[in-house]
Every structure is written in C-alpha cells, then in structure tokens.
Amino acid sequence: MNTIPPDPDPVPSPPPSAHQRVLAAFERIAELDRPEIWTTLRAQEDVLVDAKAVDERIRAGEELPLAGSLLAVKEGIDVAGLSTVAACPSSSYLPEMSATAVSRLAAAGAVVLGKTDPEQLAADPLDVASGVAVAVSLGIVDLSLGTDLIGAGRVPAALNGVVGLKPTPGLVPATGISPSTLSCDSVVVFARGLVEAQRAVGLMTGPDSRAWPADVRFGVGEHPRLAMPDDDWLRSLAAPARLALGTAAAALRSSGAVVEPCSLAAFREAGEQRVLAGYDALLLPTLPEHPGVAAVRVPSRPGEQGPSGVTVVTRAFDDQLGLDLAAVLTGEPPSLCSAPGADLVVFGAHLRGQPLNDRLIALGARFASPVRTVERYRMVLLPTEPPQPGVLPAGASGLDGERWRLSPAALSRFAAELPDPFVLGRIELEDGTCPQAVLCEAVAADGAEDLARYESWRGYLRFVSTAGPRDPG
C-alpha cells in the first residue's frame, strides 16, 4: 500500500524586516484615520530610510535588541529634525540631536514614527487623548516614550490597557527632555508587555544615569509585604477600580506576598516621601503618581464600565521588586532591572528554606534560578552548626545548587561574614557561566564524609530524613 510521506517540519518564517514593519504601521495609520494622535507624523519615505538602515545593520551581523521596533515620542522629548513644542508653542525649537533616551533606543534598532500629543492626564484616551498610550494600544507602535509628574504615565496606560513603566527618576537621562518640573518629572515607557518596557528602560540607562546605590536590593524573599487601601477608601472607588484592586491583591497573595489594608493617612505619608515602615511596596488603584518613587502600572481586563488597572509603587531604586511584583500580575517572566549586580551560587544551608537563607534575604539578594555544575566537583559533610556541605573543585560529580543575584556591596559583606572553612571561588556551570560560589578549603575535606552520590544537599537531607542514621559505607 502506497503512503504519502509526511510533510517535513515547516521552516519558520523569518521575522518581518524593519522595512516591512514600517509599511504595516502606515497601513494601520491609514486604516484607523486617527490624525489627532500625532503632533508630527514623519513622512513615510523618511521613516523607510531609517528602517532600511536598521535592516542593513542586521545583515552586516549587528545584534540589535530592538531591531525594527516602532517608537512614538511625546512632545517635549527631542527628536532630531522634528520641532519640540513642549507646553508652550511660542517657545518651540528644532533640535539637531535627539534626546539621549531616543538616541539609545534608535541605536538598539528602534525606528521613530513621530511625535504624539502632550495631553497630561488623558481624561478621554479612548477617543482623542494621550497619543503615547493610544499609539501602543492600537498596535501602531511597539513602544512609546512619555513623561510623568502627576499621573501622565499611569492614567493613560490604565485607560488604554497597556503597561506604563516609570523607573526611579534619573535612571533614564533627562538630556533632551523638557520636563514640567526638573526634580520630579520622569520618563515613562509604554508597551503592551512588561518585558518590552523593561528592555527599553535598560537600553536607555548608561554612564550618565543616576547612580544606583552600592547596596541596592534585588529581592526581599518569598513573602514581600504590600500595603493597599483599606475598606474606607475602597468604598469611594468606582466598581472597576475595586474589582481590579481586589483581583490584583488576590493574585499577589497566591504568589506568597502579604497584602494588608492600610489607612488613607499612610498613603498620604507615602506621597510626602515618608517611609512606610514594615512594607516593601504599595498596591494602588489607578491614581496620580507619587513623584520620586518607582512605579509599574499594569493593565487589568476592561469591564463593562470601562478599563481600569492597578499600580505597584516602590521606593526609589527598588525597581527590581516592582518588576517582580508586576510580573505576577501580568503573567510574564520576571525581568532584570539595570542595576549592577553579581551572581552567587550556593549549595547548602543558604538554599531557599534552609537555616541560613535569611542571611541572603537580609542582604537584598534575589533568587535567580536553579543551577547544576559540570561533572568536576565533590561535596563533603562538614561538622558545622547548622550542618553544611563543603564543595570542592576536585571530583567527578555534577552538583545542584541555586543562583542568587545581589549587589556588589552585599556580596562583599557576605564574603566577609563567611566563617572558616568557607571561601568564595569561581565555579563552572552546565550553562557555560562561571559565577562566584560558596566553596570550602581543601583541608576541610580531610576525613569528611563524601556526599557526592547525593548530587545535592537537599538530596542528602531527604535521604537522612527517610533512612535514619547514615550508612558510613
């Protein structure tokens, strides 16, 4: 019997070129017929020239993380060759250079379509307001840049069902930006997803950005504490806002977070830059921003009474915590903030759930991933309190451990607190990286029980708990 051979696996189509994406965007613009979105829409021919340059860079072998991504820019942010109007038409000017933020996104492969209207609070964005958010929501651009002082990031994002990411003020350089208030106004990225927004923020930071603290926190453990409005305030909110806030609180609690109602007075204190003692972040309905802090606004599903959303607000430089909490709400994989950090691999009592893990948490360390070493290591049982394994680069086993991310200052403190016979040293992992790890001095292995057959500290602990006394053989 003759049979027809199965079709070979289809070859995946290459992603659309920048040239193709620009053509599609202008088709979308014509289809929507929404000229009010734009203060300046670049000529299609000029945009195609930029797109062709991006495609040529890709063909030449450059790696461009934003290759072909389309970008809209709010008035008040300079784009070379396009008039900057800001809030006063009489003082408009024609910049020769783009703002640093725009230049860095373009260097990464983004193509600017034009400039959008500068509406601050976007009272009716479903019709005509705040083009930076509308252009993303309608699928015209992938990213847009705005500024935020009293809600011009959060409100348009909420009402258009997109992500609005406001990093700690100063991380994105202000060169080429005309802020309303130099000390408080900050760049906001609008995108359809959190990962896209944070990628853009990371690309815009550089040596002229506000410096990260040496001891910046990357995490707060598995149970971060958030404050949210109490019932007295919730009763004053519209139904969609209450629903959005309740849904977000439930999702965060399911992930392990502690979310507690807090009085309105406490939120007023947060607005004056006072520390909310005992809390890592605030969970708010879509309300005006608190200047001077970092925030991530994530969308909720629009209800019958219109779209709504919530905002996660953190202290300045707690951007990583904000990203991790927001990722719970969007269902996206976590994104790393651009703060300088170091990786540390642990194998024993510093693992999650083990007796010394709280030392990492106190240093602001963040669990990154499970790891496995190449088959060149040995693990022995050390007579410490609590019991710990000693790992040495002399053996034939692969060992399971955990990778943690922490600030350079925190890593230095961790190393200084390590008791004998533990030391920090490089370790080779299966993924090809060689981060720092908690090892032990070779002399400590003399006469110690070999644990190589367990391949992990947790494996050894499981054996001890089920088998009773250890078999010395």
Image: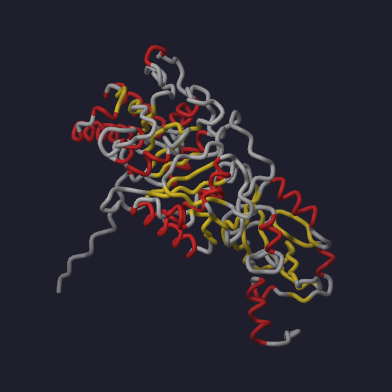
Q: Nearer the viewer, residue 231 or 124?
A: 231
Q: Nearer the viewer, residue 239 or 39?
A: 239
Residue 469: percent from left, percent from top: 73, 87
Residue 256: percent from left, percent from top: 53, 64
Q: Is 402 left or right of 102, judged from the image as shown? A: right
Q: Is 120 left or right of 13, judged from the image as shown? A: right
Q: Nearer the viewer, residue 350 or 344?
A: 350
Mark yes or no: residue 81 visible. no
Q: Residue at x 74, y 63 (%)?
A: 392
Instruction: State which quarter of the image contains the C terminus.
Output: bottom right
Residue 43: percent from left, percent from top: 28, 21
Residue 352: percent from left, percent from top: 63, 65
Q: Quadrant of residue 157?
A: top left
Mark yes or no: residue 148 visible. yes
Q: Residue at x 64, y 85 (%)?
A: 466
- How is the structure coloured here? secondary structure
Of all residues, the one furthest to the bottom in this rendering is 468
Q: Nearer the viewer, residue 147 or 67?
A: 147
Instruction: State which quarter of the image contains the N terminus.
Output: bottom left
Q: Residue at x 33, y 34 (%)?
A: 18
Q: Quadrant of residue 344?
A: bottom right
Q: Is 48 left or right of 394, judged from the image as shown? A: left
